[in-house]
Image: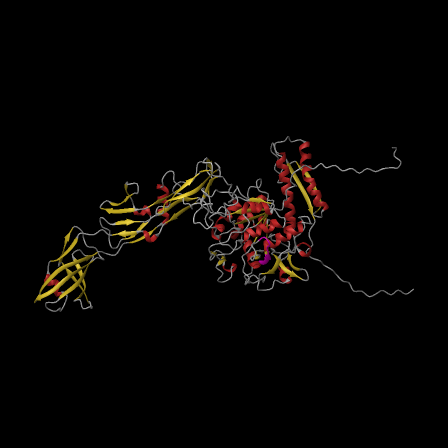
Amino acid sequence: MARTTPRIDILERDETTAGASAASTDVVYVPGFADTNANYIIYKKSGEGPDEFTRGSVATEDGGDTLVLPTASNINTLLKSAEFPCFACNTVDQIAWRCVAKISDEAEHYTWESTYLDKNGDVQPIPYVVPAPENVPTLCSSLMEFEAYFGKTPYRFTEDQSVEGMFEANASMPGAKYMYRAGDYEKSYTYAKELVRLGLPVIYENIVSRGETTLTYDASSFVYGRRGRNITLNVTDTSAFGIALGNINDNTTYTVTVNPTSTEGTYVIVSYTNGGGTSVGVNQQIADAIEVVGTDKPVVGDSATFDVTKTGDNAYTCVFKTYTYAPKITISIDENDLEAYLQKNKPAKADSYTVQFDLVYTTEGWSWAKQDGSVSAVDLNDLGIILDEHYGVANGDTIKSGAIYYGVFYEKALPTVKYLYSKLSECYSNEDKLADKGEYSVKYITSGAYPVYELKNDVVTSMIECAYKRGDAFAIIDHSNNPERSLKTTSTSGSVYAHLNAYLDNDGATGLPNSDDYTTFATMFTPWATYTCTTAPVGYQTILMPASYGYLTALATSLVTNANWLAIAGINRGLPPTIVALNTIERLTNTIADYYQPRDNRALNAITNVKPYGLTIWGNRTLVKNGDGNLTAKSFLNIRSLVCDIKKVAYTAAKSLLFEQNTEILWNKFKALLTPTLDKMTHGYGLSSYKIIKATTKYNGDPLAKGEIAAVIKIYPIYSVEDFEITVVMSDEGVEVD
């Protein structure tokens, strides 16, 4: 049919590829704990596995003829209350074991099996279950992914978590000793999970103590035994002995107690009694009146008794009755020496083992009759055994230790706040963790629900250095939760703001070689506040969180409709969506929040109540020190975020073109990979314009070497408004006369 009217065709063509959308650059790092792998011993070297010395809990019956087998669904719940794990695995060999029997209650020996008989009687391997991630930063982009890695509920502490003495004086409330009490849920898990729920990808690191050297013993089980000694005392001068007693009655028998002195052959008569219940103190020295019959010598602290009867003037009979040896020698243990000895002498194939010292003293020193029947000479100092010897050591004396458990136990230790803090610096500085820019793409580096500012074990430096060296991220530093702390800005107030400026102005205190170059890669918000966290367990959904959490939740909400280079501050994008109330006693007023944003010093970004909108982030600054009463691009946090994205895109583009020929085609490809992002920033009011320049030298003027190419990305950022100056001019209306 012939066309009768003009026609305009608008066609559509889909040139996208199947798969995931472009990866988000707004990734948050959060360290914390997870309630996973509690019953899993994990070995990470080929050939390693449990042996009879590996402590375990016997897997419970499943109602049939076979013992419970590990699965992904039961590995974190089965026997969770057991003292030791019931399963083990080797992640390299991908072999699993289960504990099936306890051989001996006394020696803590167990049987581990890697196979079982199925219902048909056939031998099958124990199912291998991949352990949940531990001490590895793990990216989670959805709640399903997060729960698959770290479980559906946060870890619940079984013991109080003291932080006493870990922070500087102003950082904590007086008497605030505990960060968590027994029964509290861990917060970093919820911190991360809520951000994922709001749409922010999170790199979560489950900090676990595993494979730690463990030494377990009962100090009271170290017992010093005195051999029965061959000693009898004979009074050689009965007259002198009796006279020393004083006026005693004739023909009456008295029980007399004497003690050896440090001078050989000299004794002190301590007391005597005629059995009437009253002892008479004497404290009379007798020299050369008593001889020792037997092979052993008395020592200070021993005592002996005689029956003494006065038979006439200066005439006495003295009959030896008993000899009592000195009290047990005191034993103390040096754990460092004991652990070093056990490590050096452990069985070749055992990661852990049970041992008992059975020591005996001879004229040649101490020797150890080992459990295998062998005997070896030992030095008590090597064993870490320290004796209080002022009562003396004699042949045949013994020391028995009781059971000592030693080894590298690969079971998961109970999470503790102190352990996490001891490992935080490594999370930011280790080359196989966040410092590896090629492995981990992250923009927001946090310490989760664990404040680090004013922590005596400096973690702040590690966080800022990590961001600085990466160049494409910034650290969000959190202070501790102390609602009683002053909010004033004066240098003597003790407030976070006052301390912050003094701290960062002192390069020696921070350990940063040039603070301002580094602190443009860091920011800080205040104060702590309560938030509603819907992914937390029911009944525990109102949670105190640090201010970084408020910033990140506001960011997540803004990203639904806004670009990530816009300031997360003010009433349009700075409203944390689930905030309930600030945790301060003083009111953090709008005036105080404004004071925290000086143009001639460092800034602290506050959350304050802006009526009628509610609690609002009132600040968009990095920690760089501003000078001369004005700001630079480095002062603005949103520009720091924008530059981080440009660096990430440039890094990815350059990495994709490495080892290609240095031609104009390569340069055009490089620009083509950058311009979509830069154009988007220009059209989205992040930049007014930009230039990509192919340089002939390095930026510092040094010549380019063979195989090098240099580019300059020059951007012209658009600044967010921090101040309005509005003038209302009042003027008389003009009158004109014709």
Asked whether 435 or 350 is in front, the reply is: 350
Residue placed most toward the observer, 172 or 110: 110
Residue in the picture at 87% in, 34% down: 3
From which residue to which does the magenta span run? 526-535
Residue 480 appears in view: yes
Q: Residue at x 16, y 50 (%)?
A: 295
Residue lying farthest to the right in this orientation: 738
**Total number of numbered labels?**
0
From this view, report whether residue 45 is shown above or below residue 108. above
| Quadrant that contains the N terminus | top right
Q: Is residue 630 left or right of residue 213?
A: right
**Residue 40 visible in the shown view:** no
Q: Residue 478 location in percent, x, y?
A: 56, 54
Residue 318 painted magenta? no
The quarter of the rendered structure image containing the C terminus is bottom right
Q: Residue at x 59, y 43 (%)?
A: 441
Q: Position of residue 79 (x, y in %)?
A: 46, 48
Residue 252 horizontal side relative to residue 538, left or right:
left
How far across and how far down the image is residue 181, in percent? 49, 57
| Residue 373, horizontal then vertical, whole percent | 28, 41
Q: Is residue 533 magenta?
A: yes
Q: Nearest the camera: 681 or 279?
A: 279
Instruction: Give 650 or 708, whichever is nearer the viewer.
Output: 650
User: Which color scheme is applied?
Assistant: secondary structure
